[in-house]
Image (tube, rainbow, N blue to C red):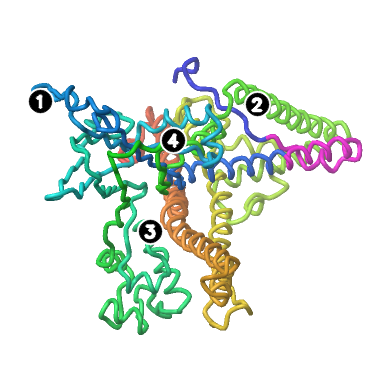
Amino acid sequence: MDLKGAKRRRLTDKSLPNVILQNPEFAEDSKMYQSLLDMERKLDWTMTRKRVEIQDTLSRNPTTTRTLRIFLSHTVSGQTWQAGTEGNDNLNLETGEGTPAWQFKIEGRLLELQLTFASYRTNEEKIKRSRANSRLLSRKWLSTLNVTLNCTPRATFVEWPRATGMQNPAMDGFTVRRTGDEAIQLRLVLYLDHYPEQFKLAPELASILGIKEESRLGVIQALWNYIKIQGLQDKVDKRIIHTDDRLRMLFGAETVPFARLPEFVNRFLAPPEPVIITYSLDPSMPPPERPLAYDVEVKTEDTAAKNRMGVLIHPNKETTANIAKMDEEIALLAQSLHNSHLKRTFLQSFAKDPALFIQTWLESQSKDLETILGSGPTDGLTVRQEELRRSEFFRLPWVEEWAGEVISSREKTVVSEEFQELEKDIELRRAGNERLFFASEAYHHALKKKKDNLALDDPEKLLPIDIFGIVMITHGEQFGEDSSYGSSLVKLGRAHCKVATLQEAYALTFKDTYFASIEKFGDELKEYDQMRKKLDSRRLSYDAALSKAEKLKNSKKEKDRKEAEEELERAQER
């Protein structure tokens, strides 16, 4: 094994031996050091938990509601009130110069989060920044634009559909040009794109859930909250949903499978209503000095929050390297202290009573010998104490035959350094897996723990956060839709119910994935231990057969030599 190219394993255990912790000489320093270790564990756990929460939030693409301000204006040219009495003399029919005409302009600006109508009119810096963001109008926010010109003798229809892919050019707005000097009425229809995609609920479903427009996931979540509040889930088979009178008229069935709820919801979803704006244009009068402004709310991805949270989860490389270096130094010092304590204890025991120390050491070695021989169920019972005190006992032939690995001079089979490194790695993983198993078991139990609560009359046990959300929704609905306090309670209760649903799903996913993998790894370690015992047994049998064959190699007894050779062949085949 190439030791130079091998990766050096870092020490991670920074704890002190219990003997040092309990020693009065080091009591104060040990207590301070142990307090620092506990504080470090809590800080690491808190930072890891917060980092995981931020990463989970980033993976779900946070959304926000932004305001899209639409400006409508028009200009005129070649009108009678502009040209005066000589207007007809300047008319050129070939080039169209001097012909009465008008231009209708549509512009869009995505306002900043804190940009109000008053500040937009007074703050030029915010206006410029808002105009810079408005170029996303035609490319991201607008799906289709229809303009209907209600002029005689028939209406004119203008449409701008958004092209597929990234072929849409960036622009500030649209302009419709026409000739004429008569007053007309324009009807503007805007089909907006939201993120996530929004849907309009059918009236029968909207009356049940209390929402008119929402994303598909939001509608399913609201329906699930309604099912939990009404107690429609089957008590035995959780996959069955019993419909009440309102849902029965909607779905047309007594029971609905839980897995088919999205399918039933899709039947009552439709594209959202477009934004319709009417505009009066009279070329015979000067156009307004300021354009008309209309605010429309759009759902979009909150990139600012995502970028802010993204900075938090990327630690400084230099700081991380310094912390890792100091942790390694602390672990080395703790290991050195542990080794020094073992040496000190060993030498103190020998200096205090050498005879007793040697006797104790011999008893320990005799127990190890009993383990190697495997001749008794307990240590120290198959060899008499009188024999252990006589040196001739250790010079008998059986010692060289059965304990050849320890005291003989012949070559024997040994475990390679690579295999030893592998065993150390397995033992490290075994200890860590046991701690992870107990910690994961307690964590999963806390996630799925359901309790009774006096706040609900329902005897079914629920999560505490679920009970809290249901009580808030029930109490908020008692105030009616006109109460802002009641509406706030309902919204906050639905949010808590969503968190409870996610917690239940996370508990199931955690058990089926991470916890199951830890249990599987524990079973694999047990299987490895069995195979390792078989390997040790076969290696010892092979060494014994090899030693016996070498002893009888020059023996005159042909029968004993052949038996030894056959035994060696059988050991090699195993």
Local secondary structure at mark 3 = strand
Residue under circle 1?
Answer: 93
Magenta residues, as a range? 14-39
Q: Is residue 41 left or right of residue 67?
A: right
| Mark 1 surroundings within 10 Å by alpha-carbon count, few (fewer than 14), some (14 through 19), many (20 or more) | few
Say which quadrant the C terminus sits in: top left
> Which tag, 3 or 4, sits closer to the chain's start?
3
Q: Nearer the viewer, residue 564 or 272?
A: 272
| Mark 4 surroundings within 10 Å by alpha-carbon count, few (fewer than 14), some (14 through 19), many (20 or more) | many
| Mark 3 surroundings within 10 Å by alpha-carbon count, few (fewer than 14), some (14 through 19), many (20 or more) | some
> Which tag, 3 or 2, sits closer to the chain's start?
3
Q: CA distance from mark 1 to mark 3?
A: 54 Å
Quarter-of-image position of residue 14: top right
Amino acid bearing label 3:
Glu
> Which tag, 1 or 4, sits closer to the chain's start?
1
Disc number at residue 543? 4
Q: Nearer the viewer, mark 4 or mark 2?
A: 2
Q: Are marks 3 and 4 in contact (CB under 8 Å)?
A: no
Local secondary structure at mark 2 = helix
Q: CA distance from mark 1 to mark 4?
A: 115 Å
Residue 526 coordinates in the image, percent (x, y):
46, 51
Disc number at residue 214? 3
Amino acid bearing label 2:
Ile
Local secondary structure at mark 4 = helix
Q: CA distance from mark 4 to mark 2?
A: 49 Å
